[in-house]
Amino acid sequence: MNSFSNVVEKVKEYCVGHPNISSMGYDLWIKTLEPHKLEDGTAVLYSDSDFSAKTAYSQYGDILKKAFEEILGFPVDIKITVKPGAEAEIKDQEMASAEEKLMNESGGKELTFDNFVKGKSNELAYAFCTAVSNVDKNDNKDVFNPLFIYGNSGLGKTHLLKAIENKVHKLDPDLNLIYITGEQFTNEYIKAVTKKETAAFHDKFRNADFLLIDDVQFIAGKDSTQEEFFHTFNELYNRGKQIVLTSDIPPSKMTKLQERLQTRFVTGTQVDIQAPDFETRIAILNKKAQELGLSLNESVTRIIAEKIKTNIRQLEGAVKKIKALTVFTSESPSVSMAQRVVKEIQIDNHPAEITVDRIIGETAAAFSVSPDDIRSKNRSAPISLARKVTIYILREVKGMTFLEIGAELNRDHSTMTTGCKDVAAMMKKNNDLNDTVRDIIKNLKLT
């Protein structure tokens, strides 16, 4: 270990004054590295925090490799990992705090219509939200009540709800506006029942002038919460109070939502938000960079916009990460930096492996049956259809043979062939079934 320690000290000496390593960068990321071992051609170094380890490797990994090769006379790989059981030093705590501050900079800023980036993917949702927030104009109030906004996570639904909240408060501060998530609504109701305070709960929500509920899909499948929300919805709707709901999926796809709630959700206006197109992604990146006082050239924004296509939060996260790196490393934003940041984001958000159990579980949830039902011998119509859809998806997504699928479901492979063909034929004639199957496949690939 002593000899390897000496090698690491010489590597650090090599890095001091290196033209591509600032003095701040050396002090923050390289000087603090500790030697662990040289094994199987890999130099393993310790760092005191995950952020420090990732930054040291992403920013200076190539230089460190070159330094080790110069000292040892042969090429080695580099691995920088967190020291087991290490407690963060005061300096590291300050670093983590500063990094967190930068990564969350503007996170607490007011979300308004002015700082919402409009594009073809969200322009209708934006227009409808601005319409309901104009409390001094009641021209189309009934048309947009309730207003139901749906689309995948990270596309701006929460921003629009908060923009409504901010605008309404400015136009009429006396209005009673409640913004809450579906999960919070559920938790508050459970707490009220437990403490026998349902009267206060009713008083709070049934006297709102505006009720904004984010991720309302969370209440699906929770019978008592749905019952409570049904009565709250009716009370507000009958009194002409504005209701705005958001969800990852449209009401028609909420298989565990009570039918009477589904019916009420579609009595007003539904609007979806799609993933932003390339031009909108560029605009979002430029807007976020401007808010952070960061100058990004066209090449940098193009790299990010071409690689991150479906999630606005990830676009904003990329800009925040670049901002943090420019502060801590004293480097200017570059294409290589953007590529590293994008790679990290894509790794962090890599979809979970699509296993047979996941496919069966997703399909079972979509058809309101259990995974055990799909694997069982039960031939009832709902379970039989769910089983056939499972066969189709296993074939479509996993590329499994009918023999392999039959082994998983404990059935003859000829039955698997028939089931797959049946679903393919039904999907051509039944749009609802086609949409459901496609949604299951999309969810498998996104989560």
Image (cartoon, rainbow, N blue to C red):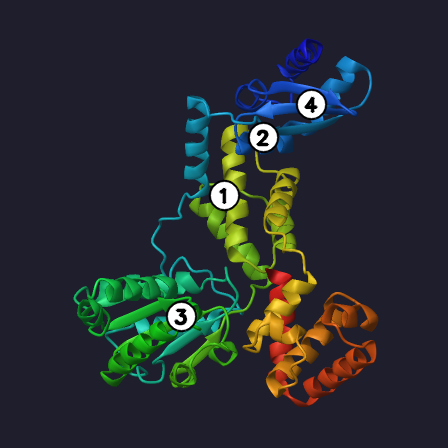
Name the residue nearer the viewer: 177 or 305: 177
Whole-percent x, y for residue 9 in the image: 65, 11
Q: Secondary structure at mark 4?
A: helix
Amino acid type, label 1: Lys
User: Distance from label 3 to label 1 (Cα)?
Assistant: 33 Å
Amino acid type, label 2: Ala
3 or 1: tag closer to the N-terminus: 3
Indicate left or right for 380 with 105 as reference.
right
Residue at 18% of width from left, 67% of height from top?
A: 200
Q: Secondary structure at mark 3?
A: helix
The residue singled out by tag 1 in the image is 320
Q: Which mark is residue 197?
A: none
Amino acid type, label 3: Ile
* Quarter location, residue 401: bottom right
Indicate left or right for 172 with 97 as reference.
left
Considering the image in quadrants, where does the C terminus appear?
bottom right
The residue singled out by tag 3 in the image is 219
* Quarter location, residue 14: top right
